[in-house]
Every structure is written in structure tokens, then in C-alpha cells.
Amino acid sequence: MLTYHKPILKEKVLYYLNVGENAVIVDGTLGDGGHSEWILQNSSPKCRLIGIDQDPEALNRARQRLQSYKRRISFVHGNFSELKQILEKKNVPKIDGLLLDLGVSSNQLDSPSRGFSFRADGPLDMRMNTEADHTAKTLLETLSDTELQNIIKNYGEERFHKRIVKAIRKAQLEGPITTTLHLSKILTRVIPQRSSQNTHSSTRTFQALRIAVNNELENLQKALDDSVDCLNASGRMVVISFHSIEDGIVKRFFQREEKGCQCPPKIPVCICGRKPKLKILTRKPIRSEPEEQKENPRSTSSRLRAAERIYV
């Protein structure tokens, strides 16, 4: 029997999406289908859903999970950054809701063969789309020292980025780094675990490589930019992030689109012509409750932000 990833903040997702009777909702990060199942269970039979995921394995699991809703949902193998093109192919001019859950699913983390986790040995892969070309192993082999340092520093917020790259290059003189445990051992030697720390020495570097392999931040920014014009009036956008970099991108985007005008403060009259497109519904990110965190520890770092499309 399949074990499915538990959807995080599912009640809040449904509340902020505010699904109407004839709504068309896009789950841009379908995963195992947990959020989509919850939405379909708690909405009108006339509500339709488009589920997008770049992981073929996740799509297969979602198809099985959502079999009873097959007439209300269509499945798309793709990336949420391709939202506009996907909707055009589906002949869907506008949607009423968009959900982006930016976390890595439990099945991806718990499968050693996917290479996301430093707690089990597996190939140094980290691709969400298993058909993509570049893996974490190829990044270590092809990036310059400066490029690799910048990735670990900026995407992992790791202050020991120079020390880490130096250790990686030293290890590569003896042979390629091909497995997760091999890389994790190198990182542990460079950054000894302190008893007062809750974060494993490998966490930040693994996060940085995963983000780089999957172009996560670039894809997120493009999806946000494109999604605004895909929403109907009063359509909602809900984004769940799991680290400060993603959350910062979402927060700044919502603020920019709510403000509209981007003219310098010294200019008394707007000359850029930008109008507000969003109304922020969550001034502060929504966090999971202690009960959910206890049941699902991976929800602890989650942050939900929501906004509504306006036309002025």
C-alpha cells in the first residue's frame, strides 16, 4: 500500500482559496495529491482542478490517490513556471485559484534513490524532474569554485561556503563524489555538529544544491509573475514556503503587486502607469499549529501567504 505525503496547512489552504461553485483551481505542485484531494472533497462537484507536477513518480501516485475524482481533475507533467503555456494548451483563459506548495514531498525525501536526503545513502541526484539533465553530482563537477560558493552561500545561507568548497575540491582529487553519504561525510568534517544545534551540518548545503539543480527560485519568480494575469477577478493565490529565501520572494512580490506604482518616492505623480493587481490577505505568514507540527514535524518551518486578484 502506498504511503502518501501529508498535506500541510490544508484547512488554511481551503479557507484562503475560497473555492467557488464553478471554480477552476490549479495545484501547481500536485505532489501526491494531498491538497488537491482535500480541495475536491470540500468543494462543489462542478469545481475543476488542474494538477501540475514535474516529477513523473509523483504524478503516478496522485493519479492513484485521486482516481475517484478523475472527471474533475486533469494531470499535467510540467513545471509551474509554465503555467501560461499549460493553460493555453488546456484552452483555459482564466483560473480562480492557484496553490503552490514549495516543499519537497516526504516520498522524495524518504527515497534514497532520489538523492535528496543526507540521512540515507543514494546517488547524488536531487532532480525533481527525473528527465532533467543536470544532477547535484554534475553541478559539483562542472561549476567553478566561485559559482559553487555563491550557490551554497546564497541558496543555503551557509557561512562556511568557502571552507565547504575547498573540502569538496580536496575530496574530488581522490575521485568523484557520487553519493549523498559521501558528500555528507565531507560536510560533517568541515562543519562539526554542535550539541546546541538542531540543524545537521549537511542541511544548508543540500538545500542549496537542490535549489540550484531544479532552478527553484527562478521558476518561482516566473510563476508568480505570470500567474497574476491568469487569475480571474477575486481569484486567489496561496503559496506555502519552507525557508526564508522563498518566503522573501513571495512577500516582496505580493507587496510590489499590491502597491502598483513603482515610481521613485520623490516623483509627485505616477509616470510608470502600474496599477495594483493584488490585495494581500495575510499580512504575516500563517504558521502551522503545534498539533500539526507534532503530527507532522516537516510542517514546522512552513509559511503560508495568500493574495487576491483585483482589477482597478
Image (spheres, rainbow, N blue to C red):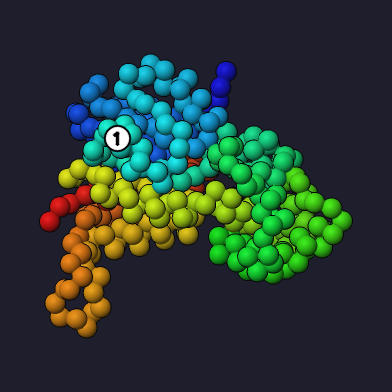
Q: Amino acid at mark 1?
A: Ile
Using a 10 Å C-alpha cutoff, classify the residue at mark 1 as few (fewer than 14 neighbours), some (14 to 19) or many (20 or more): many
In the depicted structure, whether residue 303 falls above or below residue 21? below
Query: Could you tell whether 287 is left or right of 23 in the image?
Result: right
Looking at the image, can residue 198 be seen?
no
Percent across and percent down for residue 208 are 59, 56
In the depicted structure, whether residue 66 falls above or below residue 55? above
Residue depicted at x 35% and y 31%:
50
In the depicted structure, whether residue 209 falls above or below residue 24? below
Percent across and percent down for residue 224 are 35, 52
Residue depicted at x 46% and y 46%:
102
What residue does disc 1 label?
25
Query: Could you tell whether 187 is left or right of 75 in the image?
Result: right
| Residue that extends furthest to the right in the rendered view of this protein | 174
Give the position of the N terminus as an image quadrant.
Answer: top right
Tell which of 100 and 191 is nearer to you: 100
Tell which of 228 and 67 is nearer to you: 228
In the depicted structure, whether residue 278 falls above or below residue 47? below
Quadrant of the image occupied by residue 159: bottom right
Percent across and percent down for residue 120 are 72, 40
Percent across and percent down for residue 262 are 25, 70
Looking at the image, can residue 81 be seen?
yes
Residue depicted at x 17% and y 45%:
233
Give the position of the C terminus as an image quadrant.
Answer: bottom left
Quadrant of the image occupied by residue 66: top left
